[in-house]
Image (tube, rainbow, N blue to C red):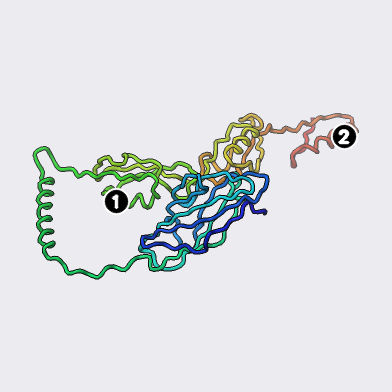
Amino acid sequence: MTAIVSIKQASDKVSCDSNGNGNCKFFVTNAYTDRQLLLKARIVTGSGTDEKWISSIQAGANAKPTGGAISNEWKLAPSATEEISVNFQVPKSVADGKYPFHLQVFSVDRPDDDFKDGEPVYLQIQDAVAPPPPPKPFPWWILVLALVVLLTIGVAVWLMMKPDDTGPVVEKAKVPDLKGMIWDEAQQRLKQAGLSKFETSFKFDPSKRDPIVLDQSPSAGSAAEAETTVSVVLSFPGIAVPDLRGKTLLAAAQTLSNSNLVLGEANSQPTNAQPEQTVIEQNPAPGQAVDKGTPIKLTVATTPTRPVIIWDRDLTKLMTRQQQIFKVMPRGIEPAEQ
């Protein structure tokens, strides 16, 4: 397979400052001299490297940076070179060491066939966290002030929580903004806000590799009781298989092509219940999530074949007719005498 681009990196090692911030640049060149490419870029992490450390990626000087490990699509002119800039934000709790990753550039039209992987690059984490300053003598007057403040807060809370004649006090929680978060992180934010009940639904989105919160109810910032159930819509990578039942074979093949799926094995089934050459069954079933390019098997209706036996009393003609009939008759069926 001919490489569609060439990839060079500014360095094979990326260092982070004391706050865990780092940057790496790559240079992507179109290998074709007469063909413009529509591309995307992604960071592929190696052993021990967490994709969450990638804060943004920008493909092209005029392109808009995107959060996460996958860039927006961009056009690369024949023989042209574009710069890919990747920013990292590594937590201070990460241990010192080398964490591998590499850049992959792929065609938007044929991502599984036309792609190029760059050379390995290492994220160098070493002495990223500055040593703590030497301890200072403890100011005891702060302890007295803290006790006074705590006492004041305690009295204020007691007054706020004190029941009155209007009924019991109901604690309210502020619903956090979950949109754009990975589901694991969103669950933690809900628990921190005092909301432990939630329900999920899914929306197919092949552009996202992890379950990302697309929508939520109640909305962010609204007040909710602790027992309120928060509903979230999560992204689900894949393509929903369309319902092909009742379509002609030609129409079903066109629908699959429009959905980035392909027509797989097509079996016939004799029946009078459906018009000829229409789809009776399909596998996978309608609505099931599958990968791009998955073949879909179909069962197509055909007209049942009924053998016709012609009797001729002339022996010579009879033998000729029988020979013709047995060529199309199902095995095991014998002609009956008249």
Residue holding disc 1: 191
| 273 or 90, nearer to the observer | 90
Q: Nearer the viewer's eye, disc 1 or disc 2?
A: 1
In the image, taking residue 334 as reference, residue 291 lies left or right, namely left
Image height of 46 relative to 31, above or below: below
Residue 316 sits in quarter: top right
**Mark 2 element type:** helix
Q: Is residue 294 visible?
A: no
Look at 27% across and 42% down and name the residue there: 228
| Spot occupied by residue 185 in the image (x, y as percentages of width and height) | 36, 52
Image height of 131 relative to 326, above or below: below
- Which of the image's four quarters has the C terminus? top right
Look at 40% across and 57% down and name the residue there: 89
| Spot occupied by residue 330 in the image (x, y as percentages of width and height) | 74, 39
Which disc number belongs to residue 320? 2
In the image, taking residue 217 as reference, residue 98 lies left or right, namely right
